[in-house]
Each structure stands twice: as structure tokens, then as C-alpha cells.
Image (cartoon, rainbow, N blue to C red):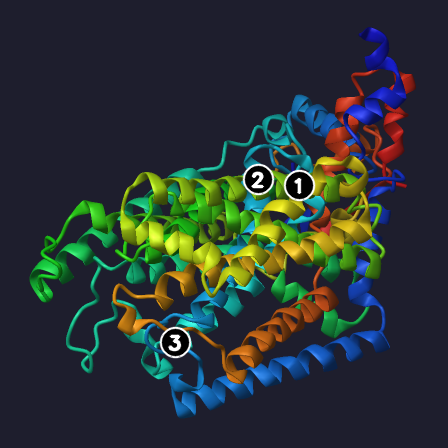
Amino acid sequence: MAQHSSIHGVVADFASPDTLLDAVKAARAQGYTRMEAYTPFPIHGIDEAMGAKPSILGYIVLCGSATGFTTAVLLQWWTGTIAYPLVISGKPLFAFEFGFPVMFELTVLLSAFAAVFGMLGLNGLPRLSHPIFNYSGVAGSSDDRFLLVIEASDKKFDANATKDFLASLGAEKLEVVEA
Amino acid sequence: MADLAFDPKAVEQLSPPLVTGKPSLHEVTEAVSIHTELETHRNWYIALAISGSVTLLLGSMLAYLISTGIGVWGNNNPVGWGWDITNFVFWIGIGHAGTLISAILFLFRQKWRTSINRFAEAMTLFAVACAGIYPLVHVGRPWRAYWLFPIPNADLAMWQNFRSPLLWDVFAVSTYATVSALFWYVGLIPDLAIIRDRATTKLRHTIYGIASLGWRGSATHWKNYEKAYMILAGLSTPLVLSVHTIVSFDFAVSIIPGWHTTIFPPYFVAGAIFSGFAMVITLMVIARWVFKVEHLVTMTHLENMNKVILATGTIVGYAYATEFFIAWYSGNEYERFTFINRAMGPYAWAYWSMVSCNVISPQFFWFKKLRTNIPFMFVLSIFVNIGMWFERFVIIATSLHRDFLPSSWGYFRPTIVDILTFFGTFGLFITLFVFFTRFLPIIAVSEVKGMMIQTEHEKHYLPATTAGSPESVKAH
């Protein structure tokens, strides 16, 4: 198929999550691979239907947790025993018992940062402009419409054929959007 | 049994509706967004003028305190911690309900949290902001407050004492404030995008567009988003339990009679949840009426929260009894004296106010009639808040005011600055709410929609007569 460099893809506008999910499955069965759904809330089962891999965010957060914990241990050990050793109430200069609250809090803090910024990073946000915003009915996708976009980068993509195919799946509105 | 399951009324009773009147998805968007879009109501300005003036009072009290010194408060020997720490613990405790609703109930898959979590999380943030003021100014020289953190600096030339629970508290409270803010903001992103998409002016579109970071609601977005939300909930759950635990360590790790007890961490956490839910009820009863979202924040929500108040209130009552038992059983004369003095000494009035508000009043919620009565729950929630304030005051004042030697006995009296500062924090709390309810969606729209669809799918498996038509939630 010809490359449509100026086209982002075809948007199909569905009225319910169920019709969208059926459409995704049908599009996959038809051999389309590069598609994206835009919905007002997460639709369960859509990732599997689209063949998307599970999120890797958990691993990013694990790195955050490890960093937080290590930082807290080193911080308390180094300040207490090397940088400023001072015996207070006969307590040891460093111990895991009294160090635990700070270790816990820093682990949580850095994990939370990793979760939020990792999520934004994986989603490519902040990004204020995107071709989907060229679709005339995009506002519906945060309200009560369920969009399926088959992207022009898909090998099987052909503006007219793809449009006809999506129409056959019960899309109530179809539009080719510019990149 | 089968008949029970297939009787629509019985099904309704077993799982009362979380959204009443079967609104469409669009109607939900409309109901939640509209208050940010209408022209500013005259009443909003009136509310802002009142709460803003009280906030100014707070500002001037703090300015007076900082420019004069801590002596303008009533704290003095022997009561070195007075209203400041009382109010700090009071406000921090209020915040706990927000995190409980947003994190713990999320992990337990409690669907009823969706309508109230945004509001409760906002309450957490604003309460923590009010709480943070106290330790900050109580250090005496707030411009040196960065000394609390392990930041290398030339003027201090030493490091913090990590063996002190007060330093743990610095980490706990600042982590709590940060993570609560992140959690709240992450929850807001998709809803800010809704307001952006509905914007009619360029300026509005730009502001909400930037605030929503360009959220598109794509399947990829939601996939990572849901994961992040789940992880944040998993992190916040132990966090919220740790915060009040560590706050209680400020007392429990000391060797003051009445403070040095192992029951403090669970007892403080239960008390925090108790007071926080009471505050959510106080605010939510007003907000659902003002913003006309009674169909989204239903009686089921209010009743469930009242059940939590009953449960945690009973735990708190049990903790009071345990404290007295242990004071007697320990055989420690100072411990025994402190508790007898607490109930019958010069602060007996405060102690018995606390018991009536915290132990007796929530027991009325055993009766369904009372826990579904809006004026009653409103009044009761205020009683609980008063009681929980007294709890912290009683713990602090009664243990400190009679030291080991009768020569260092005293009685704490707040000054007018104490009183006006505390009054002022309510102004700040309400001012932040006034702004929040004007510019942000007060209900997590995308979560409510997801919950509606999910509930409808579950009903799908029942016979058609009970399920209603599955089309009923289809968008119009």
C-alpha cells in the first residue's frame, strides 16, 4: 500500500464500549496491527484485544523503591557514623531499628515519584499536540464516545478500504485525520 | 433463595445503587463539569470573602508570632506542647480519611469510593497544608526550617539526629504531603482533559490543556495510568498507616507517663480515620447539596461512611478503656496518677467532653434510621470532630501539666493568639475548598463512568427483568 505521510489514520466513532471492543477484535482478525483506542475511561480487556504488552511501569517503580531505600540507609549511616558521630542517650550511631521509619518513607517517596513520572514518560506526556486532536469529534472521547483509530503506518492501511471496513463494524461516524 | 436473587427489589436491597436515576455517560460529565463552567455565582464571592478574611486572620497571627516569638502562644513550662501540636495532630488526622478512601478502599475494590474519593483527597491535601503550618512555626525561626531536612549547608555544620522520632515525623509528613498531592493530581489528569474538551474559550482550553498535560485517553495511556494508580494506591496504604503511627511515636517514644504506651500507633490511626470520615461527612453533606450531585453521592455513600465512623469510634473507645486498664495493671504509680488525673483532675471537663463526643455519640449509628438521617449525621460528625480535637488536647495537656515534682505543676491556658490561629486554619482549609470546587471537577468523572459500566455488566448476568436493559447506560 502507498505511504500516506500526511494522514494519521482513520477514526471510527462508536457509541458503546462493547461495540468498540468488538471492532478492535474484528480489526485484529482482519490483520490490522497499528491501532489505538480513545475512550473516556479504561475499557477492560482492550489491551489483550489490541495485542498490547502489559505495562512495564512496575519495573520502573521497583528501581525507584531500591533507590529510595538505599539512599535512606546510606544517608543515616553516613551522617550518623562518619560525618557527625554523636552519642545520644547511649544509643548506637547507626542501627536499622531506629533507621526504619526514614527508610520506609524514602522508599515510598521515590517509588511514588517513579510511578507518576514513569507513567507520564511511558505515555509520552506532557505532549500538548497530537494528530487525534485534529478529529472533529475528539471532545466526545472524554465524554461518551469510543474511538478506534487505525493508523496510516499500518501495512494493511488503505484510506478507503479501511474506512469501509470500519463502517461495516457499526461505527457511527468515520473520518480520515491529518497527521 | 433463587427467588430472592431474581427479585429486582431484593437485588436493589443487597446492593443499593451507587448512582441513582440511571444517568447517561454524558449526563454524568455534565453534572460534574457544569459547576466549573457556569458564570461565577454571587454566593461564591461571598463564601470566598468570608473564608478569605479568616485566612488573612491566620496570616496576621502568624506574622505577629514570627515577628514576636513563640511566647505569644500559651505554651510554657510545664506544658511545652500546647495547641500547636494538638492542632497539628488534629489536622493530620483529618487528612487520613482521604487517603483511606482513595487508596485502601481502592485496593479492596469498594466501588462506592468512586464518587467521594476526589473530594476526600482534596480534603487530605488541604488538611495537611493546615497541619504543616504548626511544626513549621513552632520551630521558632521558620526561616531556618530547612534545618529539619538533611541538606548539606554551611551555617548548620552538623547533621540531623535520626534517632529522634521528631525527625521521622519530618520525613513521614513531608512524604505524605507529596504522595497525596501526586495521587490527587494523577487522578485529576483525565478529568482535566474533560474540562479542556468542553472548553468554549481559547484561554480555558489552553489552561486546562496544559494542566491535563495533553491527556488523550488512549488505550496505551489508560494501561500505564491504571498501573500507576494501582501502584500509588499500594504505596499510599502503608504510607497512611505509617504517618499517624510515626506521629504517635512523637509521644510514645518519650518516657512521659500517659504517652509511653505501645497502644498509641493503632489507636492514633483508628482515631485519625474516625475524625477524617467525620470531616468528609461534614463537607460532603454540604457539597452534594450545593452542587446538586445527590444522584452521584448517594445515601449509600453517606451510610457507608457512617458505618466506618461507628467502627473506628468503637475502636477508639476500646483504646481509651485499654489505656486505663494498663495504667492500673502496670502497677506504675506515675502512670496510674496520670490517668486518674486525666479523668478527675483539672482537665476532667476536657476528658469527659472527649468521651461523650468520641465514645458515646458514634454509637447512635447502630440505628439505620439515624445513620441515614442527613441533619443528624451532620451534627454528629461535628461532635466527632470536636471530640477528636479534645482527644489530642487531653493527651498533650494532661500528661504535661503535672510533672514528676509538684513544684512543676501548672495549667495550660490558650492565649487569644492560639485561638485565632486555630480559627484561621479553618479559613485556609475552607478557602482552598472554595477554589477547588470552583475550578476542578469535585467527582472523579472517569472513575464513576467506568464503575457504572462495570456494574451494568455485572447485572448483565442476571435475568433481563432484574438487570434493566443493558442499553440503559449506553451513551445517548
- Measured as percent of width and height from the top left, residue A151 is found at 65, 41
Q: Which residue is mark 1?
A: B363
- Under mark 3, the amino acid is His
Q: CA distance from mark 1 to mark 2?
A: 8 Å
In this view, the mark in front (2 or 3): 2
Dot 3: within a 10 Å radius of its alpha carbon, few (fewer than 14), some, or many (20 or more) residues?
Answer: some
Q: CA distance from mark 2 to mark 3?
A: 33 Å
- Measured as percent of width and height from the top left, residue B325 is found at 40, 40
**Same chain assignment for discs 3 and 1:** yes
Which residue corresponds to the image point at 24% horizontal and 60% vertical from the top-left?
Answer: B164
Dot 2: within a 10 Å radius of its alpha carbon, few (fewer than 14), some, or many (20 or more) residues?
Answer: many
User: Is B139 rendered above or below residue B87?
Assistant: below
Is disc 2 placed on a helix, strand or loop?
Answer: helix
Image quarter (top left, top right, bottom left or bottom right) of the N terminus of chain B: top right
Is disc 1 placed on a helix, strand or loop?
Answer: helix
Apparent side of residue B9 relative to residue A92 in the rendered image (left or right): right
Which residue corresponds to the image point at 29% horizontal and 73% vertical from the top-left?
Answer: B408
**Image quadrant of residue B31?**
bottom right
Q: Which residue is mark 2?
A: B314
Dot 1: within a 10 Å radius of its alpha carbon, few (fewer than 14), some, or many (20 or more) residues?
Answer: some
**Marker disc for residue B138:** 3
Residue B119 at least partly seen: no
- Measured as percent of width and height from the top left, residue B281 is found at 70, 52
The answer to whether mark 3 and mark 1 are in CB contact below 8 A is no
Apparent side of residue B267 relative to residue B55 in the rendered image (left or right): left
Q: Chain for mark 1?
A: B
